[in-house]
Image (cartoon, grey):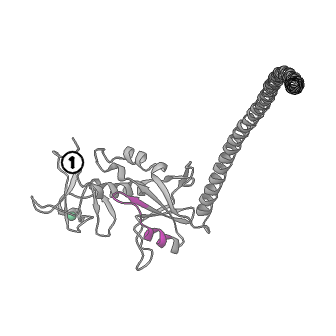
Amino acid sequence: MTPQIQMTVALDRNGQITSINDVQSGLACGCICPSCGEPLIARRGDKNAHHFAHQGIESHCDAWGPETELHLRAKAYLLSQQFITLPSCNFDKKPFKLPISKAIQEKQLSPTGRIPDLLLEIDHELLAIEIAVTHSTTKQKRATYRKHSITAIEFTLSDFKNYDTPFDDAFFAKALDINRASWLTVDLFSSLGLEIFKNETKSRRRQIEILDQGLSESEKQVSKRLRSINTEIKKASSELHNLRMIFEHELNGAAGAAMKEYEARKAEQEARIDKALSLKTKELNRLTRDIEIARQWESELSAVNEKLREENRKLKKEKKALLAD
Ligand SMILES: [Zn+2]
């Protein structure tokens, strides 16, 4: 269960934060509601925890809420402190503790400007404190501080929106921690502002150096990997070259063998053709000779026939002569 947050701080007639523990009971407290400005009654009985209440039994204030209490209690806490712990810069926060010589509530910076929650005087220099409970500082606030050359820091307490923690000194000692604080502006003409600026620059430079080292380390790794890849490529390239040589050699061998086989077959074929040709030539020669012989015979036969016919004619003539006789 979330405890009911009650109003334990209010504003006195001068607008100063006042605790229920420091006022008279009832209307005599002379306090007003920090949100609506209505007079308050201090309830300091024995039965309940001491608190401020609006006048009237059932009266209700819409303006006031637990965040008002948180905001005022945080301010009251800082006002009561003799030291404040601040972050060395925004980038790489390291705590440093400074003595507060004076705490001033709500001093208006200019007629139109805003009022800081608190102004602390530290070593004769002013430091504006903002306590953000519901929303953090706008650009406009930052611009105002810059314009007035005021170093300002903001504590963000918005993560306590559930208000389930008792708002005591122990709570604020923890809540107003450097990790919840951010520098809004730094005045470079103040020693505090200059120191924070220097810390910020130094931290960032150190971070860059660390990044650089990391980068050069990863560059080394990449370079190593590239060298190894290069070696692998060379090796693969050499193997490829060897394979090509082997392949070409084998290809040449195969071509040589094929050529040899072709030559052998060609020679064999040629020999076969030669042989066949010589046989045919012989056969042709024989035939030619046979034809010549046959022609010779024919011619001789024709001569014999002619002779026979001559003989026959002669015989016929002789027979005729004989018959005529
Ligand atoms: Zn009120």
* Residue position for label 1: 4
Cβ at disc 1 under 8 Å from ligand 1: no
Local crowd size for mark 1, using a 10 Å CA cut-off: few (<14), some (14–19), many (≥20): few
Queried whether the magenta region covers residue 137, the answer comes back as yes
Q: In this view, does 287 lie above or below 140?
A: above
Name the residue type under label 1. Gln
Extreme residue in the front direction: 325
Q: What element carries label 1?
A: loop
Image quadrant in which you'd find residue 198: bottom right
Q: Quadrant of the N terminus?
A: top left
**How many circles with numbers are drawn on the protein?**
1
Pick whichever, 215 or 273, lies toward us.
273
Q: Which residue is drawn at 21% across and 48% down?
A: 4
Pick whichever, 148 or 30, lies toward us.
148
Tell me where residue 135 appears, x and y as whole percent: 36, 60
- Residue 296 in view: no
Q: Is residue 224 above or below residue 114?
A: above
